[in-house]
Image (tube, grey):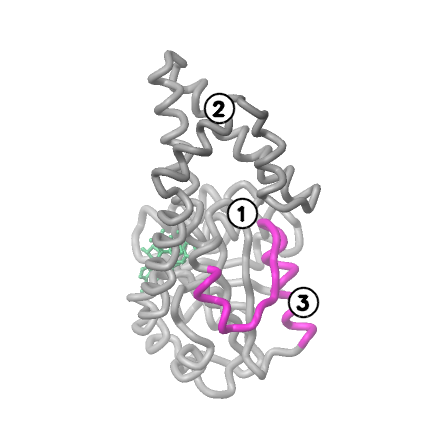
Amino acid sequence: MKIGFIGCGNMATAMLKGILKSGEVAATDMIASAKSDKTRKKIEQELGIQKTDTNAQVVDFADVVFLAVKPQFLEGVLNEIKDSVKEEQIFISIAPGKTLQWLGEHLGEKTKVIRTMPNTPAMVGEGMTALCVNELVTEKETALAVKLCNTFGKTEVIPEHLMDAVVGVSGSSPAYVFMFLEAMADAAVADGMPRAQAYKFAAQSVLGSAKLMLETGKHPGELKDMVCSPAGTTIQAVRVLEEKGLRSAVIEAQTACVKKAKGM
Ligand SMILES: NC(=O)C1=CN([C@@H]2O[C@H](COP(=O)(O)OP(=O)(O)OC[C@H]3O[C@@H](n4cnc5c(N)ncnc54)[C@H](O)[C@@H]3O)[C@@H](O)[C@H]2O)C=CC1
Ligand SMILES: O=C(O)[C@@H]1CCC=N1
């Protein structure tokens, strides 16, 4: 199996590293395209795979082609590669808001298309990717795409109508989590802790809390209650977070994020 990436920025690099590390595909069977010399140098030196400045060359080479440019450049790229597309190939988009129908219209109606939404924790093998497929993609091909995405984290196949919600809950959410981490660290710095140490304490607490929820399967409210001792410290923090509207802020932020994804 040969894999190609059109565009080799943050997400593509993270995904490529996962696939390479898994050993599922040899470096010689992978190619990525980039517009700048700097990125092509990165492809060669950091990833050790083939590079090109021509997107159609990726399509000529690969069985599975990842479309990893920003959504605003996608239409131009699809127009550029359309004549090189073969019916047996699989195209995997990682763009928010671009539907299977839209992708099929631009790639040709007989094209196998998969729509995904990964996230940047893929850079450390802890990504969360959602995936949906068009009617031309077989179960075996879906399983192949899941296997590839599992090399950089967890993957779930979902109905397409949930894809915009995924942008909010996992595609974009690392940004809100990093803001929360920064704020917690700032408070610890205000209380005298060195900044580097504050980041470590905040990040490990978030990592551990997420792991605790995933591994116990317990309701987050129950886990929160386990921390809140009667007349203790935590319930005071919870009281202030409620007063300042933490839940509402997160829900409103995510709703704005999903609204933007729908309009893309
Ligand atoms: N960064 C994130 O957290 C996530 C991003 N995505 C999506 O992934 C896609 C890529 O995003 P990033 O990697 O963050 O962006 P990026 O800007 O880091 O990478 C995009 C790359 O595509 C290249 N490019 C632009 N036009 C091109 C063309 N015509 N031909 C070949 N290469 C071209 C750019 O030079 C750049 O290196 C976008 O659709 C984004 O919405 C999805 C999930 C998470
Ligand atoms: O901000 C964005 O548009 C992309 C999509 C999901 C994460 N980053």
Label 1 vs 2, first from the N-terminus: 1
Task: Give me the disc on residue 200.
Answer: 2
Residue at image x 63%, y 32%? 226
Residue at image x 39%, y 42%? 246
From the top left corner, tell me how far across and down residue 160 is, in percent.
Answer: 51, 73
From the top left corner, tell me how far across and down residue 165 is, in percent.
Answer: 46, 63
Q: Amino acid at mark 2?
A: Lys
> Could you say which is closer to the camera, residue 172 or residue 4?
172
Mark 3 crowd level (few <14, some 14–19, many ≥20, 10 Å Cα): few
Residue at image x 42%, y 63%? 6
Secondary structure at numbered mark 1: helix
Q: Are marks 2 and 3 in contact (CB under 8 Å)?
A: no
Residue farthest front in this picture? 231
Task: Give the label, 2 or 3, closer to the camera.
Answer: 2
Left or right of 263? Residue 196 is right
> Could you say which is closer to the camera, residue 231 or residue 10?
231
Label 1 vs 3, first from the N-terminus: 1
From the top left corner, tell me how far across and down residue 119 is, in percent.
Answer: 47, 51
Label 2 CB, ligand 1: below 8 Å? no
Q: Are marks 1 and 2 in contact (CB under 8 Å)?
A: no
Secondary structure at numbered mark 3: helix
Quadrant the C terminus occupies: bottom left
Q: In the picture, residue 64 is in which quadrant?
A: bottom right
Residue 63 seen by the camera: no
